[in-house]
Image (cartoon, rainbow, N blue to C red):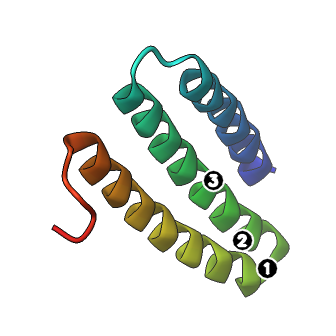
Amino acid sequence: MILLGVLIVLIGACLFCFLRAVLGPTAPDRVVAIDALTSLMVAALVILGVVYEASFYLDVALVYAMLAFLGTLAIAKYLEGRRVGD
């Protein structure tokens, strides 16, 4: 029951991050909001894996976290003005 409450709080935080990503005044604000959103989604997937006792959610969370990290690095380099290969 407690984990479901935490999951609801995480979903509420995801909504706030989504609003910041849409309404953010600058590109770095949007990048930070999307990065926070992906972190919250990974946490939600882990909690779902614990609640349903399914390791599939943990595998998806791990892959999603790695892809989100690489995406954040690529976007940060792009906003800095460098190419991804530099």
Separation of disc 1 and disc 2 at Cα? Answer: 5 Å
On screen, residue 25 above or below 52: above
* Mark found first going from the N terminus, 3 or 2: 3
Residue identifier under label 1:
53
- Please tell me the numbered disc located at residue 74: none
Q: Which of 21 and 38 lies nearest the eye of the viewer?
A: 21
User: Where's residue 67, x and y in %?
Assistant: 50, 70
Separation of disc 3 and disc 2 at Cα? Answer: 14 Å
Mark 3 nearby-residue class (10 Å; few <14, some 14–19, many ≥20): many
* Mark found first going from the N terminus, 3 or 1: 3
Give the SS element for disc 3: helix
What is the quadrant of the C terminus in the image?
A: bottom left
On screen, residue 3 above or below 15: below
Instruction: Report the side of 45 relative to 84 (left or right).
Output: right
Instruction: Report the side of 51 relative to 76 (left or right).
Output: right
Which numbered mark, 3 or 1, is in the foreground of this view? 3
Q: Which of 84 and 65 lies nearest the eye of the viewer?
A: 84
Residue at point 64%, 31% (across, down)? 18
Give the SS element for disc 1: loop
Where, by quadrant of the figure, is residue 9 drawn? top right
Q: Amino acid at mark 3?
A: Met
Instruction: Report the side of 39 relative to 7 (left or right).
Output: left
Residue identifier under label 2:
50
- Please tell me the numbered disc located at residue 41: 3
Which numbered mark, 3 or 2, is in the foreground of this view? 3
Q: Amino acid at mark 2?
A: Val
